[in-house]
Image: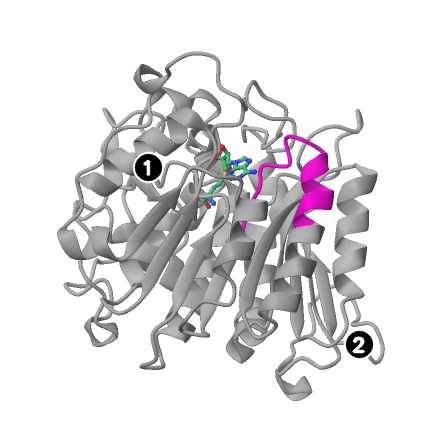
Amino acid sequence: MRTDKIKHSSNPQSRRFAFALPDDVYPKNYGATSVQRVYHRVTPAHFKGPPLFSYRHAFHAANHADVLKHSILVHILDYFNQKENPYWVIDTHAGAGIYDLSDEWATKNAEFADGLDRLLDADKHPALIERYLQSVQAFNPDGIANFYPGSPWLALQALREKDRLRLFELHPTEIDILKENLSLQDRATQKKTMVYEQDGFTGLKALLPPPTRRAITIIDPSYEDKADYRKTLQCVQDAMTRFPTGCYAIWYPLVQRREATELQRTFEKMKDCNWLNATLSVRKPPSDGFGLFGSGMFVINPPWTLHGDLAKALPWLAKQLALDERANFTLKQSASGTQPASNTKQAPEKKRDSGSKHASGTKHNSAAKHTSGARSVTGVKQASKTR
Ligand SMILES: C[S@@+](CC[C@H](N)C(=O)[O-])C[C@H]1O[C@@H](n2cnc3c(N)ncnc32)[C@H](O)[C@@H]1O
């Protein structure tokens, strides 16, 4: 892996996208408004004093967890744009919005080296990943992957004039950067966006159901506080009573923690809704019991196309992002899932559970080549225990 080359924009060629940038990077037929490419850097210069939380997403931007989360988000946004009807995107944990991968924070652990950069290495990508890379590339017209869009900016890229974006963020510095970046956007973008300096778990209640009756809600806490597991579950359960037909995309960490296992288990017991659960592990669980070894996305009311695309993308991602021989993935959906069973794909190395729509897989040999010299993706760092 080229971790020696990618840390600084002084060697920008090393972070070049592997495929040609089409003129109309974002499909014009979706009518997405262009987002200005003027961003403030999320650097320590913005640090204003002791924050309420220590988590800063800038340290983790474009890592393997972002790859899983954002590739799924882009797919969902594309799906929503296939219909003319307007919709809302509600992001309960927005972060700073966009990140500079060449700055001090992102390069500190260079987590993108074992995330986004490993995708750039490949000549061919599964459709889900190709689309995700196109979205990232749209923010890097020079073809060098220095700017990385977080969930708010991926949403802004997709939203049409009639759609709306609602962002929650509690961190005093992150919200300042988010607002500042938004203030640099055009009027149309600002008009459709609202930022709330509020707890997203509770703030969501007031927005559901949205007037459009179509919405994607992204719930992406840092899980820095272990109460986040309980809050996430309560938030989802409450949201489902208010707006059961909404699409909910919930990120969660794979860590050796009872709360993390229980959250996943409880999610999968959800009745009366369609759900999809995808996990991606990049390494074996650390022997000290701490640290992130992968992550999952639980999607309620997913696009019916998502399962099929993930069935192709996850085995590829597990191989491409593997840090050791234990890298693997799982893909499950509720029995009432909308994806026809014939479209589910069995993972190469493991048999599917009989009778369930469940795939999982590990990639062994190919993983080894990434191990040497690769940086650990451990979540134990100055900013967080989980990411
Ligand atoms: C993982 S980051 C979000 C990343 C973002 N969703 C993305 O994909 O680009 C989590 C963010 O949630 C913020 N946060 C933590 N607790 C919160 C809460 N209760 N309500 C709103 N934001 C919160 C943190 O400050 C942090 O910026």
Q: Is residue 92 visible?
A: yes
Tell me residue 239's x, y (percent).
61, 61
Disc 2 marks which residue?
A: 356
Where is 106 relative to 150, above or below?
above
Left or right: where does residue 183 sit relative to residue 263? left
Density class for disc 2 (Cα within 10 Å; few <14, some 14-19, many ≥20) is few
User: On the image, which quarter does residue 117 sit in?
Assistant: top left
Tell me residue 333's x, y (percent).
69, 72
* Nearer the observer, 97 or 246: 246
> In the image, what residue type sits under mark 1?
Leu
Left or right: where does residue 151 sit relative to residue 145? right
Q: Residue 186 shows which numbered tag? A: none
For the record, the magenta segment spans: 219-232
Question: Which is more N-terminal, label 1 or label 2?
Answer: 1
Q: At 46% from the left edge and 59% from the top edge, which residue is drawn? A: 73
Kindly report the distance in space between the C-alpha atoms of the residues bearing marks 2 and 1.
42 Å
Under circle 2, the secondary element is loop
238 within the magenta span: no
> In the image, what residue type sits under mark 2?
Ser
Tell me residue 265's x, y (percent).
81, 56
Where is 343 relative to 56, above or below?
below
Q: At 60% from the left edge and 67% from the top edge, which residue is drawn? A: 242
Instruction: State the residue lying farthest toward the front.
Output: 206
Under circle 1, the secondary element is helix
220 within the magenta span: yes
Left or right: where does residue 273 sit relative to residue 243? right
Q: Residue 178 shows which numbered tag? A: 1
